[in-house]
Image (cartoon, coloured by chain):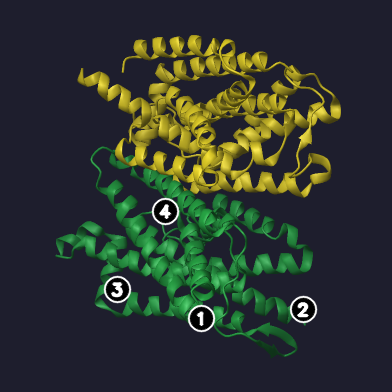
Chain colours: A yellow, B green
Amino acid sequence: MSGRTLWTGFLVALAGLALLPFGVGGYVLGLMTLAYYYGVFAMAWDLLFGFAGEVNFGPSFLTGLGAYAAGLLNHYAGWPIPACVAAGAAAAVVGGVALAVPALRLSGPYFGLITLVAVLLLQNALVLNAGFTGGEIGLDLPDVLSADESTNYWIALAFMGLSGAILFGLSRSAVGLILQASGQDAVEASALGYNVTKHKLAAFCISALFSGLAGAMLVFYLGTASVGTVVDIAVGVQVIIAAVLGGRRTILGAAIGAIFLIVAGELLRPLGQLSTFVVSAFALAVILFFPGGFLGILSSRGGAR
Amino acid sequence: MLTLQILIDGFAISSLYALGAVGFTLIFGVCGVLNLSHGAIMVAAAVAAWVFAGTYGAGPVGGALGGVVVGLVVAYVTYGLIVRPIQRSRLIPHEEKEIFVLTSTLLWGIMIQEAIAYFFTSNPKTVPPVIPGVINIAGVRTPTNELLTAVVSLGAIGLLWVLVNGTRRGRALLAAAINPRGLTLLGFELDRIYLLVWTIYGLLTGIAGVLLGAFLGVSSDNVGTLTASAFSIVVLGGLGSVSGSLVAAFVVGYLETCTAYLVSPTIRTVPVLLLLVAVVYVRPQGLLGRR
Protein backbone atom coordinates (compact mmCIF):
# COMPACT_ATOMS: atom_id res chain seq x y z
CA MET A 1 0.00 0.00 0.00
CA SER A 2 1.38 3.41 -0.84
CA GLY A 3 2.22 5.89 1.85
CA ARG A 4 -0.43 8.26 0.56
CA THR A 5 -3.31 5.77 0.91
CA LEU A 6 -2.16 4.91 4.41
CA TRP A 7 -1.94 8.56 5.47
CA THR A 8 -5.42 9.23 4.06
CA GLY A 9 -6.87 6.17 5.74
CA PHE A 10 -5.21 7.14 8.99
CA LEU A 11 -6.62 10.69 8.94
CA VAL A 12 -10.10 9.55 7.93
CA ALA A 13 -10.11 6.97 10.71
CA LEU A 14 -8.99 9.55 13.26
CA ALA A 15 -11.67 12.01 12.14
CA GLY A 16 -14.31 9.30 12.33
CA LEU A 17 -13.20 8.17 15.79
CA ALA A 18 -13.22 11.78 17.03
CA LEU A 19 -16.99 11.86 16.47
CA LEU A 20 -17.56 8.78 18.65
CA PRO A 21 -18.38 10.67 21.91
CA PHE A 22 -21.48 12.11 20.21
CA GLY A 23 -22.89 8.67 19.50
CA VAL A 24 -21.97 6.25 22.27
CA GLY A 25 -22.04 6.05 26.04
CA GLY A 26 -19.33 6.46 28.64
CA TYR A 27 -18.62 2.75 28.91
CA VAL A 28 -17.56 2.38 25.29
CA LEU A 29 -15.55 5.61 25.50
CA GLY A 30 -13.66 4.33 28.53
CA LEU A 31 -12.86 1.12 26.69
CA MET A 32 -11.61 2.95 23.59
CA THR A 33 -9.55 5.35 25.71
CA LEU A 34 -7.72 2.39 27.21
CA ALA A 35 -7.32 0.84 23.76
CA TYR A 36 -5.67 4.02 22.39
CA TYR A 37 -2.97 3.96 25.08
CA TYR A 38 -2.34 0.30 24.31
CA GLY A 39 -2.18 1.31 20.66
CA VAL A 40 0.74 3.62 21.44
CA PHE A 41 2.48 0.84 23.39
CA ALA A 42 2.12 -1.45 20.38
CA MET A 43 3.29 1.16 17.83
CA ALA A 44 6.37 1.92 19.92
CA TRP A 45 7.12 -1.79 20.09
CA ASP A 46 6.71 -2.22 16.34
CA LEU A 47 9.31 0.48 15.66
CA LEU A 48 11.83 -1.58 17.58
CA PHE A 49 10.81 -4.98 16.25
CA GLY A 50 9.54 -4.34 12.75
CA PHE A 51 12.24 -1.90 11.82
CA ALA A 52 15.26 -2.43 14.04
CA GLY A 53 14.61 -6.20 14.08
CA GLU A 54 15.02 -6.48 17.84
CA VAL A 55 12.47 -8.58 19.72
CA ASN A 56 11.80 -6.72 22.94
CA PHE A 57 10.04 -9.15 25.28
CA GLY A 58 9.69 -6.47 27.89
CA PRO A 59 7.79 -3.54 26.46
CA SER A 60 6.14 -3.25 29.86
CA PHE A 61 9.55 -2.47 31.42
CA LEU A 62 9.50 0.85 29.58
CA THR A 63 5.81 1.60 30.12
CA GLY A 64 6.15 0.61 33.78
CA LEU A 65 9.13 2.92 34.32
CA GLY A 66 7.24 5.83 32.78
CA ALA A 67 4.06 5.06 34.69
CA TYR A 68 5.67 4.64 38.09
CA ALA A 69 8.10 7.56 37.76
CA ALA A 70 5.14 9.82 36.94
CA GLY A 71 2.91 8.25 39.59
CA LEU A 72 5.45 8.44 42.41
CA LEU A 73 6.32 12.07 41.67
CA ASN A 74 2.65 12.99 41.69
CA HIS A 75 1.86 11.00 44.82
CA TYR A 76 4.83 12.06 46.96
CA ALA A 77 6.12 15.33 45.51
CA GLY A 78 2.81 16.64 44.24
CA TRP A 79 4.24 17.66 40.87
CA PRO A 80 1.67 18.84 38.31
CA ILE A 81 0.61 16.33 35.64
CA PRO A 82 2.63 17.72 32.68
CA ALA A 83 5.85 17.71 34.72
CA CYS A 84 5.13 14.16 35.90
CA VAL A 85 4.44 12.92 32.37
CA ALA A 86 7.66 14.54 31.11
CA ALA A 87 9.59 13.00 34.00
CA GLY A 88 8.00 9.63 33.28
CA ALA A 89 9.04 9.79 29.63
CA ALA A 90 12.55 10.83 30.68
CA ALA A 91 12.76 7.94 33.15
CA ALA A 92 11.70 5.47 30.45
CA VAL A 93 14.36 6.81 28.06
CA VAL A 94 17.10 6.68 30.71
CA GLY A 95 16.05 3.18 31.76
CA GLY A 96 15.76 2.15 28.13
CA VAL A 97 19.28 3.35 27.35
CA ALA A 98 20.67 1.69 30.47
CA LEU A 99 19.06 -1.53 29.24
CA ALA A 100 19.85 -1.12 25.55
CA VAL A 101 23.52 -0.11 25.62
CA PRO A 102 24.69 -3.45 26.97
CA ALA A 103 21.76 -5.46 25.62
CA LEU A 104 22.29 -4.44 21.99
CA ARG A 105 25.61 -6.26 22.04
CA LEU A 106 23.51 -9.37 22.33
CA SER A 107 21.29 -10.73 19.64
CA GLY A 108 18.12 -12.71 19.10
CA PRO A 109 17.05 -14.83 22.08
CA TYR A 110 19.62 -13.28 24.42
CA PHE A 111 18.34 -9.77 23.83
CA GLY A 112 14.80 -11.09 24.31
CA LEU A 113 15.65 -12.76 27.59
CA ILE A 114 17.41 -9.71 29.02
CA THR A 115 14.40 -7.53 28.27
CA LEU A 116 12.15 -10.16 29.87
CA VAL A 117 14.35 -10.30 32.97
CA ALA A 118 14.26 -6.49 33.19
CA VAL A 119 10.47 -6.66 33.54
CA LEU A 120 10.65 -9.35 36.19
CA LEU A 121 13.21 -7.34 38.19
CA LEU A 122 11.13 -4.17 37.96
CA GLN A 123 8.04 -6.10 39.02
CA ASN A 124 9.88 -7.63 41.99
CA ALA A 125 11.26 -4.23 43.01
CA LEU A 126 7.79 -2.71 42.95
CA VAL A 127 6.08 -5.54 44.81
CA LEU A 128 8.82 -5.95 47.43
CA ASN A 129 8.77 -2.22 48.24
CA ALA A 130 5.01 -2.24 48.51
CA GLY A 131 5.05 0.29 51.36
CA PHE A 132 6.49 2.90 49.02
CA THR A 133 5.05 1.90 45.65
CA GLY A 134 1.65 0.55 46.61
CA GLY A 135 2.68 -2.93 45.44
CA GLU A 136 0.03 -5.20 43.97
CA ILE A 137 -2.83 -3.03 45.18
CA GLY A 138 -1.62 0.03 43.33
CA LEU A 139 -0.62 3.60 44.00
CA ASP A 140 -3.47 6.10 44.01
CA LEU A 141 -2.82 9.46 42.41
CA PRO A 142 -4.18 12.76 43.68
CA ASP A 143 -4.53 14.16 40.15
CA VAL A 144 -6.34 12.78 37.11
CA LEU A 145 -6.31 14.00 33.50
CA SER A 146 -9.99 14.85 33.50
CA ALA A 147 -13.17 13.71 35.19
CA ASP A 148 -15.08 13.97 31.92
CA GLU A 149 -15.23 10.83 29.77
CA SER A 150 -15.34 12.65 26.44
CA THR A 151 -12.36 14.85 27.33
CA ASN A 152 -10.36 11.81 28.40
CA TYR A 153 -11.32 10.12 25.16
CA TRP A 154 -10.21 13.04 23.00
CA ILE A 155 -6.94 13.41 24.89
CA ALA A 156 -6.17 9.72 24.33
CA LEU A 157 -7.20 9.87 20.66
CA ALA A 158 -5.13 12.99 20.02
CA PHE A 159 -2.18 11.42 21.80
CA MET A 160 -2.44 8.24 19.74
CA GLY A 161 -2.91 10.21 16.52
CA LEU A 162 0.13 12.38 17.17
CA SER A 163 2.32 9.46 18.27
CA GLY A 164 1.15 7.44 15.28
CA ALA A 165 1.91 10.28 12.88
CA ILE A 166 5.42 10.79 14.30
CA LEU A 167 6.29 7.07 14.46
CA PHE A 168 4.79 6.32 11.05
CA GLY A 169 6.49 9.33 9.48
CA LEU A 170 9.75 8.24 11.01
CA SER A 171 9.36 4.71 9.71
CA ARG A 172 8.85 6.02 6.18
CA SER A 173 11.81 8.39 6.36
CA ALA A 174 15.41 7.68 5.39
CA VAL A 175 16.15 6.79 9.02
CA GLY A 176 13.37 4.21 8.92
CA LEU A 177 14.91 2.62 5.82
CA ILE A 178 18.33 2.45 7.45
CA LEU A 179 16.75 0.86 10.51
CA GLN A 180 14.99 -1.68 8.35
CA ALA A 181 18.24 -2.48 6.60
CA SER A 182 20.04 -2.87 9.94
CA GLY A 183 17.33 -5.15 11.19
CA GLN A 184 17.33 -7.41 8.15
CA ASP A 185 21.04 -7.59 7.39
CA ALA A 186 23.20 -5.85 9.96
CA VAL A 187 26.46 -6.85 8.27
CA GLU A 188 25.51 -5.45 4.90
CA ALA A 189 24.06 -2.28 6.39
CA SER A 190 27.27 -1.57 8.26
CA ALA A 191 29.28 -2.43 5.14
CA LEU A 192 27.33 0.33 3.39
CA GLY A 193 28.66 2.72 6.00
CA TYR A 194 25.71 3.01 8.37
CA ASN A 195 26.30 2.89 12.07
CA VAL A 196 23.95 0.04 12.92
CA THR A 197 24.30 0.21 16.70
CA LYS A 198 23.74 3.95 16.77
CA HIS A 199 20.55 3.63 14.74
CA LYS A 200 19.25 0.75 16.82
CA LEU A 201 19.98 2.69 19.99
CA ALA A 202 18.10 5.68 18.59
CA ALA A 203 15.16 3.39 17.78
CA PHE A 204 15.23 2.06 21.32
CA CYS A 205 15.22 5.62 22.73
CA ILE A 206 12.27 6.65 20.59
CA SER A 207 10.40 3.47 21.46
CA ALA A 208 11.13 4.09 25.15
CA LEU A 209 10.06 7.72 24.88
CA PHE A 210 6.64 6.87 23.50
CA SER A 211 6.17 3.86 25.79
CA GLY A 212 7.03 6.02 28.81
CA LEU A 213 4.76 8.85 27.70
CA ALA A 214 1.86 6.47 27.12
CA GLY A 215 2.47 4.70 30.43
CA ALA A 216 2.49 7.99 32.32
CA MET A 217 -0.64 9.27 30.55
CA LEU A 218 -2.41 5.97 31.19
CA VAL A 219 -1.93 6.14 34.97
CA PHE A 220 -3.26 9.70 35.04
CA TYR A 221 -6.27 8.51 33.09
CA LEU A 222 -6.85 5.56 35.43
CA GLY A 223 -6.02 7.57 38.56
CA THR A 224 -3.93 4.69 39.86
CA ALA A 225 -0.66 2.98 39.00
CA SER A 226 -0.63 -0.77 39.53
CA VAL A 227 1.68 -3.58 38.52
CA GLY A 228 -1.16 -5.45 36.81
CA THR A 229 -2.00 -2.66 34.36
CA VAL A 230 1.43 -1.33 33.34
CA VAL A 231 4.23 -3.74 34.34
CA ASP A 232 2.97 -7.32 34.30
CA ILE A 233 4.34 -9.70 31.66
CA ALA A 234 0.75 -10.18 30.45
CA VAL A 235 0.68 -6.49 29.42
CA GLY A 236 3.82 -6.99 27.35
CA VAL A 237 2.36 -10.13 25.78
CA GLN A 238 -0.78 -8.18 24.76
CA VAL A 239 1.41 -5.52 23.15
CA ILE A 240 3.45 -8.05 21.17
CA ILE A 241 0.38 -9.94 19.99
CA ALA A 242 -1.31 -6.66 19.00
CA ALA A 243 1.64 -5.58 16.88
CA VAL A 244 2.05 -8.90 15.07
CA LEU A 245 -1.71 -9.27 14.61
CA GLY A 246 -2.15 -5.80 13.13
CA GLY A 247 0.72 -6.33 10.73
CA ARG A 248 4.35 -6.05 11.67
CA ARG A 249 6.48 -3.31 10.18
CA THR A 250 3.48 -1.08 9.53
CA ILE A 251 3.33 0.96 12.80
CA LEU A 252 -0.33 1.87 12.18
CA GLY A 253 -1.29 -1.80 12.06
CA ALA A 254 -0.02 -2.19 15.61
CA ALA A 255 -2.56 0.36 16.84
CA ILE A 256 -5.34 -1.43 14.92
CA GLY A 257 -4.27 -4.71 16.49
CA ALA A 258 -4.31 -3.21 19.99
CA ILE A 259 -7.76 -1.69 19.55
CA PHE A 260 -9.02 -4.98 18.11
CA LEU A 261 -7.68 -7.01 21.04
CA ILE A 262 -9.27 -4.78 23.66
CA VAL A 263 -12.61 -4.44 21.89
CA ALA A 264 -12.80 -8.16 21.04
CA GLY A 265 -11.93 -9.09 24.63
CA GLU A 266 -14.80 -6.89 25.79
CA LEU A 267 -17.34 -8.10 23.22
CA LEU A 268 -16.62 -11.70 24.16
CA ARG A 269 -16.94 -11.00 27.87
CA PRO A 270 -20.24 -12.97 28.07
CA LEU A 271 -18.17 -16.08 27.30
CA GLY A 272 -16.43 -15.60 30.65
CA GLN A 273 -13.06 -17.25 30.91
CA LEU A 274 -13.30 -18.58 27.38
CA SER A 275 -13.05 -15.07 25.90
CA THR A 276 -9.25 -14.97 26.19
CA PHE A 277 -9.16 -18.42 24.61
CA VAL A 278 -11.21 -17.30 21.62
CA VAL A 279 -9.24 -14.08 21.10
CA SER A 280 -5.93 -15.99 21.28
CA ALA A 281 -7.19 -18.65 18.87
CA PHE A 282 -8.31 -15.99 16.42
CA ALA A 283 -4.99 -14.15 16.67
CA LEU A 284 -3.14 -17.44 16.15
CA ALA A 285 -5.20 -18.22 13.07
CA VAL A 286 -4.49 -14.77 11.59
CA ILE A 287 -0.77 -15.15 12.25
CA LEU A 288 -0.65 -18.64 10.71
CA PHE A 289 -2.78 -17.97 7.63
CA PHE A 290 -2.16 -14.26 7.05
CA PRO A 291 1.35 -13.55 8.34
CA GLY A 292 1.02 -9.95 7.16
CA GLY A 293 -1.68 -9.27 9.74
CA PHE A 294 -4.71 -7.02 9.25
CA LEU A 295 -2.90 -4.40 7.19
CA GLY A 296 -1.25 -7.18 5.19
CA ILE A 297 -4.67 -8.57 4.23
CA LEU A 298 -5.84 -5.10 3.19
CA SER A 299 -2.77 -4.31 1.13
CA SER A 300 -2.74 -7.64 -0.73
CA ARG A 301 -6.39 -6.98 -1.73
CA GLY A 302 -5.38 -3.52 -2.88
CA GLY A 303 -2.50 -4.94 -4.89
CA ALA A 304 -4.71 -7.42 -6.71
CA ARG A 305 -7.16 -4.81 -7.86
CA MET B 1 20.45 -29.67 60.11
CA LEU B 2 19.50 -26.64 58.05
CA THR B 3 22.46 -27.34 55.77
CA LEU B 4 21.25 -30.88 55.16
CA GLN B 5 17.69 -29.64 54.62
CA ILE B 6 18.93 -27.17 52.00
CA LEU B 7 21.07 -29.85 50.37
CA ILE B 8 18.16 -32.30 50.08
CA ASP B 9 15.46 -29.82 49.02
CA GLY B 10 17.83 -28.05 46.66
CA PHE B 11 18.81 -31.37 45.09
CA ALA B 12 15.20 -32.38 44.39
CA ILE B 13 14.26 -28.95 43.04
CA SER B 14 17.39 -28.74 40.90
CA SER B 15 16.85 -32.19 39.36
CA LEU B 16 13.29 -31.25 38.48
CA TYR B 17 14.45 -27.94 36.96
CA ALA B 18 17.03 -29.86 34.97
CA LEU B 19 14.42 -32.21 33.56
CA GLY B 20 12.10 -29.31 32.72
CA ALA B 21 14.87 -27.42 30.96
CA VAL B 22 16.52 -30.29 29.06
CA GLY B 23 13.57 -30.77 26.71
CA PHE B 24 13.39 -27.05 26.05
CA THR B 25 17.08 -26.84 25.16
CA LEU B 26 16.88 -30.03 23.07
CA ILE B 27 14.29 -28.74 20.61
CA PHE B 28 16.10 -25.43 20.43
CA GLY B 29 19.41 -27.14 19.74
CA VAL B 30 18.09 -29.57 17.13
CA CYS B 31 15.12 -27.77 15.55
CA GLY B 32 15.94 -24.15 16.38
CA VAL B 33 12.55 -23.73 18.06
CA LEU B 34 12.07 -21.66 21.21
CA ASN B 35 8.81 -23.14 22.41
CA LEU B 36 7.02 -20.58 24.58
CA SER B 37 4.16 -23.00 25.26
CA HIS B 38 6.60 -25.10 27.30
CA GLY B 39 5.08 -24.18 30.66
CA ALA B 40 1.59 -24.85 29.33
CA ILE B 41 2.54 -28.37 28.25
CA MET B 42 3.95 -29.09 31.71
CA VAL B 43 0.79 -27.81 33.40
CA ALA B 44 -1.42 -29.76 30.96
CA ALA B 45 0.41 -32.97 31.85
CA ALA B 46 0.16 -32.29 35.58
CA VAL B 47 -3.54 -31.40 35.48
CA ALA B 48 -4.26 -34.48 33.34
CA ALA B 49 -2.49 -36.66 35.90
CA TRP B 50 -4.58 -35.05 38.64
CA VAL B 51 -7.80 -35.67 36.70
CA PHE B 52 -6.97 -39.29 35.80
CA ALA B 53 -5.84 -40.12 39.33
CA GLY B 54 -8.71 -38.35 41.05
CA THR B 55 -11.85 -38.08 38.94
CA TYR B 56 -11.37 -41.24 36.88
CA GLY B 57 -9.95 -43.26 39.75
CA ALA B 58 -6.91 -44.46 37.81
CA GLY B 59 -4.76 -44.29 40.93
CA PRO B 60 -1.46 -42.47 41.33
CA VAL B 61 0.47 -44.64 38.84
CA GLY B 62 -2.26 -44.62 36.19
CA GLY B 63 -2.64 -40.88 36.66
CA ALA B 64 1.07 -40.28 36.23
CA LEU B 65 1.16 -42.37 33.04
CA GLY B 66 -1.93 -40.63 31.70
CA GLY B 67 -0.35 -37.26 32.43
CA VAL B 68 2.80 -38.13 30.52
CA VAL B 69 0.74 -39.33 27.55
CA VAL B 70 -1.23 -36.07 27.52
CA GLY B 71 2.06 -34.11 27.65
CA LEU B 72 3.28 -36.09 24.63
CA VAL B 73 0.04 -35.52 22.72
CA VAL B 74 0.08 -31.77 23.38
CA ALA B 75 3.70 -31.61 22.25
CA TYR B 76 2.77 -33.40 18.99
CA VAL B 77 -0.11 -30.98 18.44
CA THR B 78 2.22 -28.03 19.07
CA TYR B 79 4.58 -29.36 16.44
CA GLY B 80 2.03 -30.48 13.88
CA LEU B 81 -0.39 -27.60 14.12
CA ILE B 82 1.87 -24.64 14.80
CA VAL B 83 5.60 -25.09 14.45
CA ARG B 84 5.69 -27.22 11.31
CA PRO B 85 3.24 -25.10 9.27
CA ILE B 86 5.31 -22.01 10.08
CA GLN B 87 8.57 -23.70 9.16
CA ARG B 88 7.10 -24.79 5.82
CA SER B 89 5.16 -21.59 5.11
CA ARG B 90 6.08 -19.75 1.92
CA LEU B 91 4.35 -16.59 3.06
CA ILE B 92 6.69 -16.00 5.98
CA PRO B 93 10.20 -14.85 5.08
CA HIS B 94 12.90 -17.16 6.39
CA GLU B 95 14.54 -14.64 8.73
CA GLU B 96 11.22 -13.90 10.42
CA LYS B 97 10.26 -17.51 11.18
CA GLU B 98 11.76 -17.29 14.63
CA ILE B 99 9.49 -14.45 15.77
CA PHE B 100 6.48 -16.19 14.25
CA VAL B 101 7.26 -19.37 16.15
CA LEU B 102 7.70 -17.29 19.31
CA THR B 103 4.40 -15.41 18.98
CA SER B 104 2.42 -18.45 17.88
CA THR B 105 3.67 -20.75 20.62
CA LEU B 106 3.04 -17.94 23.09
CA LEU B 107 -0.58 -17.68 21.91
CA TRP B 108 -0.92 -21.46 21.92
CA GLY B 109 0.34 -21.53 25.52
CA ILE B 110 -2.27 -18.94 26.49
CA MET B 111 -4.96 -21.05 24.79
CA ILE B 112 -3.93 -24.16 26.73
CA GLN B 113 -3.81 -22.15 29.95
CA GLU B 114 -7.28 -20.69 29.43
CA ALA B 115 -8.76 -24.05 28.41
CA ILE B 116 -7.41 -25.64 31.59
CA ALA B 117 -8.72 -22.77 33.70
CA TYR B 118 -12.13 -23.08 32.04
CA PHE B 119 -12.57 -26.82 32.43
CA PHE B 120 -10.68 -27.47 35.67
CA THR B 121 -10.53 -23.97 37.30
CA SER B 122 -7.25 -22.23 38.08
CA ASN B 123 -7.12 -23.55 41.66
CA PRO B 124 -3.79 -25.15 42.58
CA LYS B 125 -3.82 -28.92 42.15
CA THR B 126 -1.57 -31.48 43.77
CA VAL B 127 -1.07 -34.76 41.92
CA PRO B 128 -1.22 -37.71 44.35
CA PRO B 129 2.33 -38.99 44.88
CA VAL B 130 3.21 -42.37 43.42
CA ILE B 131 4.97 -43.36 46.67
CA PRO B 132 3.45 -41.66 49.70
CA GLY B 133 5.13 -41.42 53.09
CA VAL B 134 8.11 -39.79 54.69
CA ILE B 135 11.72 -40.92 55.06
CA ASN B 136 14.01 -39.74 57.82
CA ILE B 137 17.44 -38.82 56.40
CA ALA B 138 19.84 -38.08 59.27
CA GLY B 139 17.14 -36.23 61.15
CA VAL B 140 15.56 -34.42 58.19
CA ARG B 141 12.06 -35.65 57.48
CA THR B 142 11.82 -35.85 53.70
CA PRO B 143 8.75 -36.93 51.70
CA THR B 144 9.57 -40.10 49.80
CA ASN B 145 8.04 -38.46 46.76
CA GLU B 146 10.73 -35.76 46.87
CA LEU B 147 13.42 -38.43 46.52
CA LEU B 148 11.44 -40.12 43.76
CA THR B 149 11.29 -36.78 41.93
CA ALA B 150 15.06 -36.49 41.98
CA VAL B 151 15.61 -40.13 40.98
CA VAL B 152 13.13 -40.08 38.10
CA SER B 153 14.38 -36.71 36.81
CA LEU B 154 18.01 -37.73 36.78
CA GLY B 155 17.08 -41.19 35.46
CA ALA B 156 15.22 -39.68 32.49
CA ILE B 157 18.14 -37.37 31.73
CA GLY B 158 20.51 -40.34 32.00
CA LEU B 159 18.41 -42.29 29.50
CA LEU B 160 18.50 -39.32 27.15
CA TRP B 161 22.29 -39.24 27.43
CA VAL B 162 22.53 -42.94 26.57
CA LEU B 163 20.15 -42.46 23.63
CA VAL B 164 22.07 -39.52 22.18
CA ASN B 165 25.54 -40.88 22.66
CA GLY B 166 24.96 -44.61 22.40
CA THR B 167 22.60 -45.17 19.49
CA ARG B 168 22.82 -44.47 15.79
CA ARG B 169 19.55 -42.51 15.83
CA GLY B 170 20.78 -40.48 18.76
CA ARG B 171 23.97 -39.57 16.97
CA ALA B 172 21.92 -38.55 13.94
CA LEU B 173 19.98 -36.29 16.26
CA LEU B 174 23.20 -34.72 17.48
CA ALA B 175 24.33 -34.27 13.88
CA ALA B 176 21.04 -32.54 13.04
CA ALA B 177 21.83 -29.98 15.71
CA ILE B 178 25.23 -29.24 14.20
CA ASN B 179 24.65 -29.47 10.46
CA PRO B 180 21.16 -30.41 9.23
CA ARG B 181 22.03 -30.00 5.56
CA GLY B 182 25.01 -32.33 5.86
CA LEU B 183 22.73 -34.91 7.41
CA THR B 184 20.23 -34.80 4.53
CA LEU B 185 23.13 -35.29 2.11
CA LEU B 186 23.95 -38.49 3.98
CA GLY B 187 20.45 -39.76 3.26
CA PHE B 188 18.75 -39.11 6.58
CA GLU B 189 15.27 -37.73 6.51
CA LEU B 190 15.14 -34.60 8.64
CA ASP B 191 11.38 -34.86 9.16
CA ARG B 192 11.76 -38.18 10.93
CA ILE B 193 14.51 -36.80 13.14
CA TYR B 194 12.38 -33.80 14.07
CA LEU B 195 9.49 -36.11 14.92
CA LEU B 196 11.82 -38.12 17.14
CA VAL B 197 13.01 -34.95 18.89
CA TRP B 198 9.45 -33.82 19.53
CA THR B 199 8.60 -37.27 20.90
CA ILE B 200 11.52 -37.09 23.32
CA TYR B 201 10.57 -33.51 24.16
CA GLY B 202 6.96 -34.43 24.87
CA LEU B 203 7.95 -37.34 27.12
CA LEU B 204 10.53 -35.31 29.07
CA THR B 205 8.20 -32.34 29.50
CA GLY B 206 5.24 -34.57 30.40
CA ILE B 207 7.27 -36.35 33.08
CA ALA B 208 8.56 -33.01 34.39
CA GLY B 209 5.01 -31.67 34.57
CA VAL B 210 3.65 -34.68 36.46
CA LEU B 211 6.57 -34.63 38.91
CA LEU B 212 6.12 -30.90 39.44
CA GLY B 213 2.42 -31.41 40.09
CA ALA B 214 3.16 -34.04 42.74
CA PHE B 215 6.07 -32.17 44.34
CA LEU B 216 4.93 -28.52 44.45
CA GLY B 217 1.44 -28.58 42.91
CA VAL B 218 0.47 -26.60 39.81
CA SER B 219 -2.16 -24.12 38.72
CA SER B 220 -2.92 -22.84 35.25
CA ASP B 221 -1.62 -19.47 36.48
CA ASN B 222 1.90 -20.95 36.64
CA VAL B 223 2.22 -21.33 32.87
CA GLY B 224 4.12 -18.09 32.25
CA THR B 225 6.45 -18.48 35.21
CA LEU B 226 7.33 -22.04 34.23
CA THR B 227 8.20 -21.04 30.68
CA ALA B 228 10.28 -18.12 31.97
CA SER B 229 12.18 -20.39 34.39
CA ALA B 230 12.98 -22.91 31.67
CA PHE B 231 14.06 -20.11 29.34
CA SER B 232 16.28 -18.58 32.04
CA ILE B 233 17.95 -21.86 32.95
CA VAL B 234 18.58 -22.71 29.34
CA VAL B 235 20.12 -19.31 28.54
CA LEU B 236 22.18 -19.41 31.71
CA GLY B 237 23.60 -22.77 30.69
CA GLY B 238 24.02 -21.87 27.04
CA LEU B 239 21.22 -22.21 24.48
CA GLY B 240 21.19 -25.67 22.95
CA SER B 241 23.76 -27.11 25.36
CA VAL B 242 22.25 -29.99 27.34
CA SER B 243 25.12 -30.27 29.82
CA GLY B 244 25.01 -26.48 30.30
CA SER B 245 21.33 -26.69 31.19
CA LEU B 246 22.11 -29.34 33.80
CA VAL B 247 24.74 -27.17 35.47
CA ALA B 248 22.50 -24.10 35.28
CA ALA B 249 19.53 -26.00 36.74
CA PHE B 250 21.57 -26.91 39.80
CA VAL B 251 22.94 -23.37 40.16
CA VAL B 252 19.41 -21.93 39.95
CA GLY B 253 17.85 -24.63 42.16
CA TYR B 254 20.38 -24.22 44.96
CA LEU B 255 20.47 -20.43 44.71
CA GLU B 256 16.68 -20.27 45.07
CA THR B 257 16.61 -22.78 47.92
CA CYS B 258 19.39 -20.98 49.82
CA THR B 259 17.65 -17.62 49.37
CA ALA B 260 14.34 -19.04 50.52
CA TYR B 261 15.79 -20.71 53.63
CA LEU B 262 18.46 -18.19 54.62
CA VAL B 263 17.01 -14.82 53.58
CA SER B 264 13.30 -14.82 52.80
CA PRO B 265 11.00 -16.84 50.55
CA THR B 266 9.54 -13.62 49.09
CA ILE B 267 12.76 -12.73 47.23
CA ARG B 268 13.44 -16.33 46.17
CA THR B 269 13.79 -15.51 42.45
CA VAL B 270 15.62 -12.18 42.69
CA PRO B 271 19.24 -13.44 43.07
CA VAL B 272 18.69 -15.76 40.11
CA LEU B 273 17.50 -12.87 37.92
CA LEU B 274 20.52 -10.77 38.91
CA LEU B 275 22.88 -13.67 38.23
CA LEU B 276 21.23 -14.15 34.86
CA VAL B 277 21.74 -10.51 33.90
CA ALA B 278 25.37 -10.66 34.99
CA VAL B 279 26.09 -13.88 33.06
CA VAL B 280 24.37 -12.73 29.89
CA TYR B 281 26.35 -9.48 29.87
CA VAL B 282 29.73 -11.03 30.66
CA ARG B 283 29.31 -14.30 28.80
CA PRO B 284 26.36 -14.12 26.39
CA GLN B 285 26.87 -17.70 25.19
CA GLY B 286 26.04 -18.94 28.73
CA LEU B 287 28.06 -21.09 31.10
CA LEU B 288 28.80 -23.97 28.73
CA GLY B 289 27.45 -22.64 25.43
CA ARG B 290 29.32 -22.61 22.19
CA ARG B 291 29.10 -19.68 19.88
Task: Name which residue type carries label 2.
Answer: Leu
Residue at the spot 72% in from the left edge and 25% down from the top edge: A220
Could you tell me which secondary element the residue under label 4 belongs to?
loop
Q: Which residue bears the numbered disc 2?
A: B2
Camera-nearest residue between B189 and A35: A35
Is A105 situated above or below A75? Answer: below
**Residue B34's mark?**
4
Answer yes or no: are tags 4 and 3 on the same subunit: yes
Q: Which residue bears the numbered disc 3?
A: B170
Camera-nearest residue between A173 and A275: A275
Is A280 situated above or below A46? Answer: below
> In the image, residue A12 lies at what x, y percent?
44, 10
Residue at the spot 67% in from the left edge and 30% down from the top edge: A66
Is B287 situated above or below A208? Answer: below
Could you tell me which secondary element the residue under label 1 belongs to?
helix
Judging from the image, mark 2 belongs to the subunit labelled B
Task: Name which residue type carries label 1.
Answer: Gly
Left or right of residue A284, residue B208 in this image: right
Could you tell me which secondary element the residue under label 3 belongs to?
helix
Camera-nearest residue between A242 and B200: A242
* Image quarter of the C terminus of chain B: bottom left
**How far is disc 2 from disc 1 in space, using C-alphas?**
35 Å
Q: Earlier in the sequence, mark 3 or mark 1?
A: 1
- Mark 4 or 3: in front is 4
Q: Earlier in the sequence, mark 2 or mark 1?
A: 2
Q: Are marks 3 and 2 in contact (CB under 8 Å)?
A: no
Q: Which residue bears the numbered disc 1?
A: B59
Answer yes or no: are tags 4 and 1 on the same subunit: yes
Answer yes or no: are tags 4 and 2 on the same subunit: yes
